[in-house]
Amino acid sequence: MKGLMFLPFVALTFFSWGLYGPTLHLGQDAFGAEGQRSAFRPFICVGLAYFMVAVLVPAMVLRTRGEVGHWTMKGFIWSFAAGAIGAVGALGIILALKFGGDPIYVMPLVFGCAPVVNTMVTMLMTGNMKQASWPFFLGIVIVAIGAAGVLVHKPSKPKPSATAAIPAVSRIHADATPATAATLAANPTVSPQDEAQSPPAGTAAETSAGSDQDASSSQAAGNSGNQDSASTLPATAAVVATDQDEAFKDDDRGAFASMVLRGMFILMTALCWGAYGPVLHKGQQVMGGSRMRPFLCVGLAYFVVAVIFPLAIQTGFRPEPGSWFSFGGWFWSILGGSLGALGALGIIYAFNFGGKPLFVMPLVFGIAPVVNTFSEIIGKGLWGQVDTFFYLSLFLVIAGAVTVLITAPKAKPHKPEPAKA
């Protein structure tokens, strides 16, 4: 059982990081306005949360109780670098969500790609690349395939039918009689109801006269008008269709640009969070196995990258919609940052109790998307939209993570660096 003491801290991490995306998403919506999500405000709140959880708490523990290990410049640099990498990854998540992403597929995609990065970085740093067996790489591939399956088969609420999106003017021209359509083509501000209620010009005169000649002339004029309206209606419909096509093209361009940006930021986060574990583990090693000191360095890095830096550069950008006066924005963003910090603390303690990045991080990134996805399903009421392939993909994520855990290359035990006299 002693060899499994790290598992509770791994569980703390994947639960915290599994809830991180959905919680932060709520903060972005609460801080935003005009249909746009905020990016700077939630990011700054994440930095403040890390300062409270990962700087103030470790400083108090070190001052009152002390801890094994020691401060070293090399350990500070490695740990601070890990925190900076994690903060950049958090920014990637925020920007991916800002540009139309949804946690139900953004987070599984990040968590599916990050273990691959984590494993390669760790094996390069430890020099045991040749010790990895094919089942180990198969487990990494299964995690990635499972995460991709979650993306493809993600549950979502049904979209409104295409007919609901057709502009009202096109339906008016389609349903109107030829005479009414001709009137509308000449004067688009006239509605079919107005056309039906207003009497045609010259009705009173025709009634008083009541002659067959006038009636036949009126019928001939009506037939001529119908022919004119029939020839006018296709041209009007063509103009409406052209306007619709141009609008759809603009929407497609914007959707494509947003999709590219989402992909870039998801990749950025996967690369950063994949390298986070090995770099942090290195900082812990060179600080003599300390837990609180590397964690404090991570908090300082988050404060610099996510608070000081955004406040310094935000004057050079156009102000975001919304304002700071949002209780929901503060609450959810601070909570999201706190969950991220607790996950980082869980990683540190998992390492301290014998866990190795080669299987701790893939296990975290394998189960965290499951927590994330089910929290989204429950929160958004998507149970009816979940299909069998989605559950199969989640199973692949877990199975791949377990495979990585069992077949991870065993690195040689590392002796903490002794303190300098």
Image: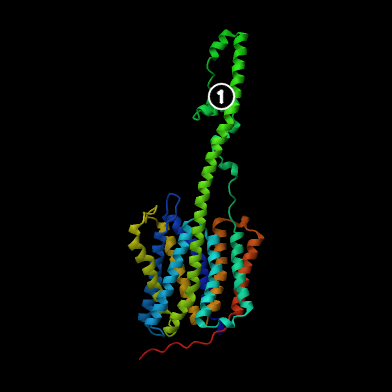
- The quadrant where residue 401 appears: bottom right
Q: Compared with residue 412, is residue 97 higher up or lower down, i.e. above or below?
A: above
Q: Which residue lies furthest to the right in this view?
A: 388
Q: Nearer the viewer, residue 53 or 307?
A: 307
Q: Where is residue 118 in the image (x, y as percent from the top left)?
A: 52, 74
Q: Which of 57 and 133 is in front in this view?
A: 133
Q: What residue type is labelled 1?
A: Ala
Q: Is residue 219 left or right of residue 202?
A: right
Q: Nearer the viewer, residue 281 or 56?
A: 281
Q: Is residue 177 visible?
A: no
- The quadrant where residue 305 appears: bottom left
Q: Is residue 97 left or right of residue 132?
A: left
Q: Position of residue 92 (x, y in %)?
A: 46, 64
Task: Look at 42% across and 72% down and name the residue there.
Answer: 83
Q: Name the quarter where the C terminus is drawn.
A: bottom left
Residue located beneath label 1 in the image: 196
Colour mode of the rendering: rainbow
Task: Look at 54% across and 39% down and name the residue there.
Answer: 242
Q: Tag 1: Cα neighbours inside 10 Å, few (<14), some, or many (≥20)?
A: few
Q: Is residue 139 left or right of residue 291?
A: right
Number of numbered discs overlaid on the protein picture: 1
Q: Can residue 95 be seen in this view?
A: yes
Q: Name the quarter where the N terminus is drawn.
A: bottom right
Q: Compared with residue 114, is residue 282 higher up or lower down, i.e. above or below?
A: below
Q: Compared with residue 282, is residue 36 higher up or lower down, i.e. above or below?
A: above
Task: Look at 43% across and 68% down and name the residue there.
Answer: 87
Q: Where is residue 244 in the image (x, y as percent from the top left)?
A: 54, 41
Q: Which of 45 and 203 is in front in this view?
A: 203
Dot 1: element = helix
Q: Position of residue 279 (x, y in %)?
A: 46, 77
